[in-house]
Image: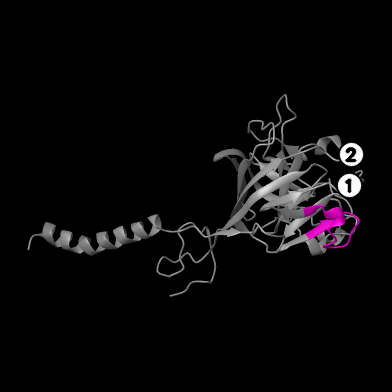
Amino acid sequence: MKKTAIAILFLIPFMACSQESSQNVENEEQEWIQIFNGKDLTGWDIKIKGYELNENYKNTFYVEDGIMKVSYDEYETFNQEFGHMFYNQPFSYYRLRAEYRFVGEQVNNGPGWAFRNNGFMLHSQSAQSMGLDQDFPISIEAQLLGGRGEGERTTCNLCTPGTNVVMDGKLETRHCINSTSKTYHGDGWVEVEFHVYGDEKIVHLIEGDTVLYYEKPQMGGGNVSGYDESLMVDGKLLSEGYITIQAESHPTEFRKIEVLDLVGCMDPKASNFKSYYVKGDDSCVY
């Protein structure tokens, strides 16, 4: 038999196997986790400055008609009651996707910078570790901003309560850094996505376009008060944490919040292998 024929016979099973593997990847379903169930606040912990864990002061957070709401309907005035709602499972490598919008008027006495302002806190400390009078969790804030009706005001920005990041190879200590997004005026829904890769890098996307990128999220800096000082270790890289939603004095609504965990079995021979995983663990099933 000629060498060419032998080579072809040898390659046939390999090609078939590769084709099957490729088809499996193409048909692979991404297992997004709906961390907001559309019905209630199951799975979330609430911490509002000055109040005990899970004391939902003046019904700041609630669900109505399938929408998660940050509301100030029961407030007469705002007295620095900065609130946060924490999903009770930590993540390290993941994608977070959500739809949000700002509605109504800012509550009386809300700070000017908090007008149409909310955010997702990434790699956040837990709700249980928050101080009674702590204003913001030690975390990386993916800041959400709405337009003022005129002028430019980007969204998907970065703010750093108790943290710093590295950008362009240098430690960045500014508290807030704008993205390259356009301005979103009005009350329309906006879809955002955040790709979080442990303590390596974080990418902000809006409507599929990358608008901000930074590396090595870590503890440090200021812009947070009332925290347990034993938790702050300057320079400590943040490799995982909790996902948190803010309440900073302007009504905000969310209708979708979902996570794609990027940690799992990375052995293609296993039944629970996913090609989109970027960090392996010991969960493989054969």
- Residue on which disc 2 sits: 108
| Chain part drawn in magenta | 46-61
Q: Closer to the camera, 87 or 235? A: 87
Which is more toward the observer, 194 or 220?
A: 194
Q: How many labels sit on residues?
A: 2
Q: Nearer the viewer, residue 113 or 79?
A: 79
Q: Is residue 209 left or right of residue 245?
A: left
**Callout 1 secondary element:** loop
- Give percent across and percent down for residue 217: 69, 50
Residue 98 is marked as none
Image x and y of residue 273, in percent:
45, 65
Decide if residue 256 is in sight here.
Answer: yes
Residue pictured at 77% horizontal, 61% vertical: 45
- Left or right? Give the position of 264 relative to 26: right
The residue most toward the top is 151
Residue 136 rendering spot, x and y as whole percentages? 82, 51
Residue 205 falls in image quadrant = top right
**Marking on residue 75:** 1
Residue 186, located in which quarter of the rendered image?
A: top right
Q: Examine the rendered structure and indicate whether residue 185 appears above or below residue 28.
A: above
> Can see residue 141?
no
Where does residue 21 sit, x and y in percent of width and height? 35, 61
Kindly identify the residue that appears in the image at 85 percent across and 34 percent down.
112
Q: Which residue is rendered at x = 42% and y = 59% of the image?
A: 28
Mark 1: give few (<14), some (14-19) or many (20+) Cα within 10 Å. some
